[in-house]
Image (cartoon, rainbow, N blue to C red):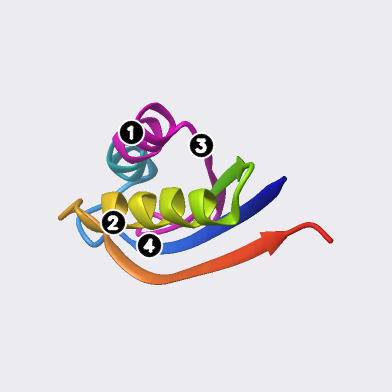
Amino acid sequence: MHAAVLDLDLHIPQARSLKDKRAVLKPILEGCRRRFSVAAAEVGAQDRWQAAELGVAAVASSAQHVSDVLDAVERFVWSFPEVEVVSAERCWLGP
């Protein structure tokens, strides 16, 4: 079993409230879950209007498949013009 987590720090320049921020993040998180069958959530900066930290986890029988899925998720997030990806960090879990 292979598992990895993708940690994404985002900047949302047009957000003027937490409601605006959630409106931008909701389609990103739901799209990740639906298209790539991963666990995805906002895991940090929840009280800041223009910042977000997303966590995406994937588990598979091969490391290559996990890597391919997280690469696709990262490209998917980059495709949203409403957000700027400040950083993306991958962490492998397990022995």
Q: Secondary structure at mark 3?
A: loop
State how far apart marks 3 and 1 are (Cα).
10 Å
Q: Nearer the viewer, residue 82 or 72?
A: 72
Q: Earlier in the sequence, mark 2 or mark 3?
A: 3
Q: Position of residue 59 (x, y in %)?
A: 62, 42
State how far apart marks 2 and 3 are (Cα).
14 Å
Name the residue carrying label 2. Answer: 75
As for residue 79 lying within the magenta part, the answer is no
Residue count near mark 4 (Cα–Cα under 10 Å), binned few <14, some 14–19, many ≥20: many
Residue count near mark 3 (Cα–Cα under 10 Å), binned few <14, some 14–19, many ≥20: many
Q: Position of residue 80 (x, y in %)?
A: 20, 51
| Labels 3 and 1 touching (C-beta < 8 A) | no
Name the residue carrying label 4. Answer: 10
Residue count near mark 2 (Cα–Cα under 10 Å), binned few <14, some 14–19, many ≥20: few
Work out which quarter of the rendered image holds the C terminus and state it.
Answer: bottom right
Q: Secondary structure at mark 4?
A: strand
Dividing the picture into quarters, in which one does residue 23 lie?
A: top left
Q: Which residues are magenta?
A: 26-54
Name the amino acid, label 4. Leu
Q: Is residue 47 visible?
A: no
Name the amino acid, label 2. Arg
Mark 4 vs mark 3, foreground winner is: 3
Q: Earlier in the sequence, mark 4 or mark 1?
A: 4
| Labels 2 and 4 touching (C-beta < 8 A) | no
As for residue 33 lying within the magenta part, the answer is yes
State how far apart marks 4 and 1 are (Cα).
16 Å
